[in-house]
Amino acid sequence: MSGRKERYVSISEADLRRLQEQDSRLRSVQQDLPDRLNRMRAEANREMQQRLLPLEQRAKQQEQEAQRLRSNLGTLERETQQRLRIQREDFQQAVRESEVRQQQALLQEGDRLTSAMRAGFEKQRTEYLRITADQRQEYLTLNQQLNQKFSELLEEERQARETGQQMLQQQIDRVFDSLEQERLSKAKLAQELLTDVEQIWQQIDRDYQHQRFAPNQLADLRRNLELAKQNLAAGVFEAAIATSQDTYLKLADLRLQLEQKEQEWLLYYTTTLEDLRSLISEVQAHRQIEIELGEAGGAVETFQEEVDYWTDGRLSAYHQKLDKFHQELTEGQSTLTTQQIQELAQQIEALRPELADIAHQAKMQVILSQMRAEIADNVVEMLESYGYQLADPNTDASYEGADYRNAYVVKVKNIAGEEVVTVITPEKELGANNISINAFSDRLLDEEQLRQRAEGIFNALHEESGLELQGQTQCYEQPQAEYRDIEQVKHRQTKPKNPSF
């Protein structure tokens, strides 16, 4: 007669919490994260310099074009281009200095990060997040400096424009010998001013991504130019001059706004891309982890494990999510707005804690897998007192499907040829297992004796191993025959029964 006795057991809350908090059990096998970050940072610096080149080329072209303006706007434009050139040089110098500081910080803190990685995953994460936060703060500081510089530049521009307006008004108010001479002079002034403003409008349309950073504003100013043309054609020269002058002032303000927004965009884009690449570097550095099992001061076993294996590919899926963000950022370099980049940055930041959760899952899966084997060893030891023996651990014990994430199965026999197969199956709840003790025999067995024996084993697991017993022992007439042949158990194709995290 055969039969099966089952009982749900779980790790006590205190033991589970202790296992979860033992960070010293988990480390990255690959200790090259500092090198990865340094290489990534160097590449980011090169890319940033490439993004700054068009700004320099545009500035040179605009300075050349300012020389060809015919009205008094030429003087204003040349002065404006000079101020913008100084601002751009200051901006680029600030970016370069920031990059140097970040590189030096990474080099100086590389040893500390490596040491933290050896100490444990949580310490490494704390150090890594501090370094990346420092990098992010560098760009935030740059952005604050940028706002301050443009505030100063705007004030200088306003003062220069007031002077320009006074000069223009003096030209308009000149005393002429005849009305015809006055009319011709104002017509010439209106035409030159309109031509220059038209050129500046085209320059902004050509050189700036105005629809991305200031939608429709340039198109609105186009209508002002059309109005000035109509006034000029109708001989209303002072109106044409006034409209052209007003349009120029608005174009000048728009250009400053676009310059600031473009540089601001560069900072946000670079920061977000570097944050993302840093996180990808960290993921790549943690595909393998090292886990220690054993109590402090005692025998310790060390395992090197693939995170993807123990999390059913969760790390690769996480990496793919990051790669999609990277693709979105790189492909959207010419179209993404600052707001869209900030939204992406928030989404990326929200993903950051998931890596720690994935590593934690892998650690716990390894520990719980090992515990299933230990529970089985304890059951075997108790069955030995009833005359059963484990013939060969290599042939009579195995994880189902030879997959360490699955149930652990062990078979013992007595001299009468009776077999007992114990199956330790992980349950959905973290730290919970179903223990199934299956008796196989050709002779009649005492059901009550089998039940008491199983109860004794379960109670011993509770008292000696600290496992919590859940519910009552369930008794079934038929054992789980599919686990009797250990060779079949080894080669069975099964899906891992990972607990939920």
Image (cartoon, rainbow, N blue to C red):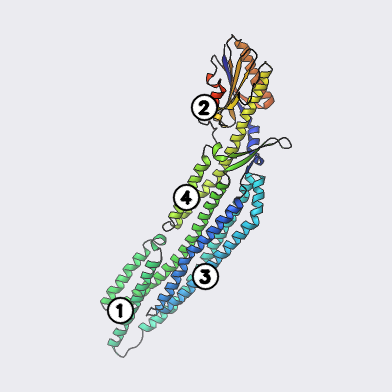
Quadrant of the rendering where the N terminus is positioned: top right
Q: Disc 3 versus disc 2: distance between alpha carbons?
A: 68 Å
Which residue is most to the left? 234
Total number of numbered labels?
4
> At numbered mark 1, what does the secondary structure look like: helix, strand or loop?
helix
Residue tagged 4: 325
Q: In the image, 294: left or right of 63? A: right
Asked if disc 1 and disc 3 are in contact, CB closer than 8 Å, the reply is: no
Which percent across, then down, holds residue 418?
61, 14
Q: At x 29% / y 84%, what residue is drawn? A: 184
- Which residue lies under the disc numbered 2? 492
Q: Nearer the viewer, residue 317 or 409?
A: 409
Measure the C-alpha gap from mark 1 to mark 3.
40 Å
Residue assigned mark 1: 237
The amino acid beneath tag 1 is Phe
Closer mark to the observer between disc 4 and disc 2: 2
Which numbered disc flags the more N-terminal residue, 3 or 2?
3
Name the amino acid, label 4.
Phe
Give the structural element (helix, strand or loop) at label 4. Answer: helix
Q: Report the side of 148 relative to 24 (left or right).
A: left
Q: Based on the displayed image, in which of its 4 quarters is residue 107 positioned?
A: bottom right
- Mark 1 Cα shell of 10 Å, populated few (<14), some (14-19), many (≥20): many
Compute the Cα span from label 1 to label 2: 93 Å
Q: Which residue is mark 3?
A: 89
* Residue 7, horizontal then vertical, whole percent: 59, 21
Residue density around tag 2, few if under 14, some if 14–19, many if 20 or more, within 10 Å: some
Secondary structure, mark 3, is helix
